[in-house]
Amino acid sequence: MRTSFVLLLLCLSLSLYGQDNTPVSGRTISTQGELLPYATITIHKTIDSVIIKSVLSDSAGNFIFKSLAAGSYFVHVSSVGYKEYVSPAFTLSSSPVDIGAIQLTVKAGVLKDVKVRAERPLIEQKVDRMVMNIENSILASSNNALELLQQAPYVSVDNNGNISLKGIQNTTVMIDGRLTYLSAAELANFLRNMHASQIATIDIITNPSSKYEAAGNGGIINIKMKKNLSIGLNGSFNTNLQQGRLPQITNGLSLNYRKGKFNLYSGINHSKQERWVEETTDLSFYDVATKEAQSHFSIAENTFYHSNSLNGRAGIDYSFSKKTIAGILLTAFSGGEDEDGNNANKIQSFSLGVDSNLQTLHTGTSQWNRYSGNINLRHQFDSLGKVVSFDYDYADFNDRSKPGYLTSYYNGSGSNTGSTYLNANMGTGIKMASFKGDYEHPVNETLNFSAGFKWSRVHTLNAVNYYQNGFFDKRRSNDFDYTETINAAYADVSKEFKKASLKLGLRAEQTISNGVQLTQDSTFKKQYTQLFPTTFFRYKWNKNHSSGITINRRIGRPDYESLNPFIYLSDPYTSWGGNPYLQPALTNVINVSHNYKGMINVFVSYNETTNALAQYQTSDTTSSGIFSTWATWVKQNKCLQV
């Protein structure tokens, strides 16, 4: 049988999320016509002057407000060293509003009877990260955490809440330096329920140092929460309703109790949302030998999703002394989603014309329960900042889903030729455990040394059973057992000079993985050790200009879904599965950046990846349809980003 590969002629995916999206935009400049980046702009209802949203202008001075209801508004603009500006009222209806250029005037005054108070700038550029100071800023008054990230430098958030850093997805989001263990959708809901007033700073780490795991190219966003030092019981409640074509409702409650050496804190969040997704895909298959088109697939899919989720966290901190503190944190996440959709497939042979049409009605239910716990200990040896800390984490995830597909078949003339019903029971269990230790040793005010270790293990058990017309389908069913252990150690040293900062680090990681296909009674094992050096250098030319260079190495390990050879179905003719023979991708990154007045950031980044993972499609010999999987692209993949 000849092997045919697919050439993707057109793959258009359109996600429709019901939101009013009439924008209000403008830009900020000085009276001399210079750009004013990172000015703070708030938009208010004219009737009561209540702040609706706040944003920062970008590096070119541009700003935009989205998802606003019709009504009368005005904007307020402020920037350090400039007089505040209040716009005339304007009316927003169905057409976008462009306020145009807003000129800010430099403040004029004499230093007289002034009390000097040190305040951090909104954006701080450090040698290995950018810090966004939220506490005591205007951004803390009217935003949730997800909206804050939309305004952070280098960060992008799409309509579904997926977060990317410098255009690269798979960004790791941490809370107080700890992983969240949430999916992209769960993380988005969690951040929507976190009010900005709870956040102290946001660290934006585009090129992580050796302290952090070497996996992933998406960078790290570390959200540091404010420490509630109020004595006694206090708390807050927030609710958020977004209504467009379909509604989203989120509610959150947090409580904190501090007395003596104890601090107890808790929070619970509920989310309910509905989504409508439309996708259209056109695919053509070509013969490898003749390079002639053999057949064409056209797929149109409409799906309605309804989900409910509840997450909670509770913790306790105990101060043994002023220098030693221990804590326990427990989190839980539970939810479910129902889907109801319709797929229309047309299969065409270029030699015979339209071969067949398919109409698939698909339904599904899914449930997930996720629990995690953390035990931590931190001890500070002296006032210089010598600190040692230990963390133990454990997480247990259980996901179950039951999809079903009722497909009706029609021949080229439109006559019904029959129908089939395909359904499945899918279950995934994931257990994760890790233990790490970190040590910080400031030698003096300009020299610092740090080192640490981490052990982690992930065990995944996945079971899928398919049934066709009520009978067990052994061809599509399988059990997959996967274990991955990573042993790591790191050390780095940093030095501050008069006008420069230097940080050097090295991390070693050993990976041991073992996969077992239980149904097919086959196994695969992998073991490898890699070194990951990091270099950070920043030079301050004068009070307005600074430049930096970062060099590091990253690894992209295939996740269990990419390795898992299970066959997942979108409909009887569209499926995807993993490849157990994938190799890890290694990426060398060089990043050069320049900063002006702590506001304008320009960077050039060059990436070179070996063994890059690539998704491709081919014909499915089982169903004569489309099968998607992953392969290792052994050649070097080079990328220049500005």
Image: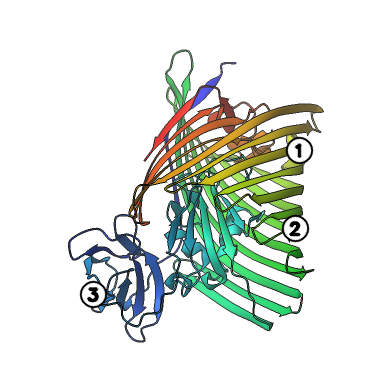
Which corner quadrant of the image does residue 263 belong to? bottom right
Which residue is the site of mark 3? 108
| Residue 58 as seen in the image, left or right of residue 395 | left
Which residue is the site of mark 2? 372
- Mark 1: give few (<14), some (14-19) or many (20+) Cα within 10 Å: some
Which residue is the site of mark 1? 485
Q: Among all residues in the image, which is located at the extreme top?
A: 289
Task: Pick the quarter of the image with the C terminus.
Answer: top left
Q: Disc 2 versus disc 3: distance between alpha carbons? A: 55 Å
Q: Secondary structure at mark 2?
A: strand
Q: At label 1, which amino acid type do we have?
A: Thr
Q: Secondary structure at mark 3?
A: loop
User: x%, y% of residue 527?
Assistant: 74, 28
Q: Earlier in the sequence, mark 2 or mark 3?
A: 3
The residue shown at (76%, 59%) is 377
- Mark 2: give few (<14), some (14-19) or many (20+) Cα within 10 Å: many
Task: Pick the quarter of the image with the N terminus.
Answer: top right
User: x%, y% of residue 476?
Assistant: 71, 35
The residue shown at (76%, 69%) is 319
Q: At label 2, which amino acid type do we have?
A: Ser
Residue 152 in view of the camera:
no
The residue shown at (65%, 46%) is 450
User: x%, y% of residue 117?
Assistant: 44, 74
Q: Nearer the viewer, residue 420 or 554?
A: 554
- Mark 3: give few (<14), some (14-19) or many (20+) Cα within 10 Å: few
Q: At label 3, which amino acid type do we have?
A: Ala
User: x%, y% of residue 315?
Assistant: 74, 68
Q: Nearer the viewer, residue 426 or 380?
A: 380
